Image (spheres, rainbow, N blue to C red):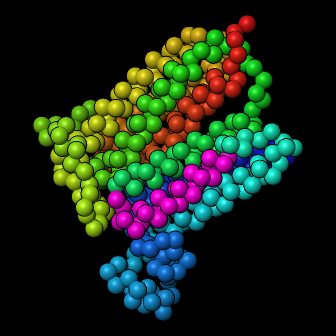
Amino acid sequence: MQYNYRKIALFGCLLAAVVVTLGAYTRLSNSGLGCPDWPGCYGFMSVPTLAEDVLVAQSQFPESEIEHEKAWIEMIHRYFAAILGLLVLFLCVIAIRYKRESPLPTKLVCLLTLLILFQGALGMWTVTMNLQPFIVMGHLLGGFSILSLLSLLYFRVATSLSPLADKVSHRFKMVLFVLGILVIQIALGGWVAANYAAPHCTGLPACNNMELFSINSLFHLPIGQENYEYGVLPFETRLSIHFVHRFWALVTSIAIFVMAIKLYALATSTTFKYAILWVVALLIIQLSVGAAIVYLQFPLLLTLFHNFMAAMLLTSMVRLCFLIKYRCGEAV
């Protein structure tokens, strides 16, 4: 049972990474309202393509123009998200069913199930509230949270919890603190995407129009609109949002590098050393991709890769926390 559960959990991690990437592609390709209803598309469970179905869809949603490419992008994302939800529910049922026979992390998988249900509600509100930025950012964070918890579930069931003696055993709070800094950075990235603020800050390392930056403009919230597609905030607010994301990227990078140097100096096992180097390598790649995105004027595929790398960096930090929390004992 443990072996099969581990394989299903691993598949869940891979599927969650696909769902997060598809969600980012849906957002970046402006396909978030490709289907104006939820969970179907123009009243159908797939994109209407037959002439009679298109006529029915147009009569039911006269204010929406059917763009088949965007609609399919949105529906493919929903299909994969639905499969992921069923998979998590299956993992939860199995964990509860065999609770006495096999020591599976029941509480963790139950938390995952609740998060999946809430994520589905956020997906519905994203459409019904016409891409309200707070909901969009929450939906993005929900996806990253599900990936993180699924990764933690896989680490729990796939890794021997026998003690691994190492001097980093007392550094869990520091790593957890840096993980929190990274989560804030991901949330800021989600806020940039939700407000379509990426192209409003060109130039490196600072924005070309930095004279427009204003702390006060950051409190200009996107509320009270009927539709938030393509953003509703003024230029200076979006520029300020983007610059804060860049500034916090610097804070995050310094925090991770300092953490890595301290941990690597203490680490005695190759397991921890490789885990630390993996985090640093992913961070360097992420910083390089971020700079390339601005230099190349925000190409879609490179921006999509930036989202994917953020998910991988988060997962690597979760693994580092796991190793210290569950594997690390006193150094011998």
Q: Where is residue 254 shown, x and y percent of the image?
A: 40, 22
Q: Is residue 210 above or below residue 250?
A: below
Q: Residue furthest left?
A: 211
Q: Quadrant of the C terminus?
A: top right
Task: Give the percent coordinates (x, y) of residue 186.
Answer: 42, 40
Residue at x 43%, y 90% (from the top left corner): 55
In this view, the residue farthest toward the bottom is 52
* Displayed quadrant of residue 66: bottom left
Q: Is residue 248 left or right of residue 201?
A: right
Above or below, 259 relative to 184: above
- The number of callouts visible is 0
Seen as rendered, the residue at the extreme right is: 101
Q: Is residue 109 left or right of residue 143?
A: right
Q: Residue at x 60, y 27 (%)?
A: 320
- Image quadrant in which you'd find residue 217: top left
Tell me: 267 left or right of 253. right
- Residue 205 occupies which quadrant of the picture? top left
**Residue 54 shown in magenta:** no
Whether residue 126 appears in magenta in the rendering, the answer is yes
User: Looking at this rendering, what residue extends furthest in the top direction?
Assistant: 332
Looking at the picture, how far across and down is residue 26, in whole percent? 44, 60
What percent of the width, then of the height, locates residue 166? 67, 13
Q: Main secondary structure of the magenta part?
A: helix
Q: Residue at x 58, y 33 (%)?
A: 318
Can residue 286 be seen in this snapshot?
no
Give the extent of the magenta segment.
Answer: 109-132
- Residue drawn where x is 63% and y is 53% of the image: 113
Task: Please say if 151 is above or below 331.
Answer: below
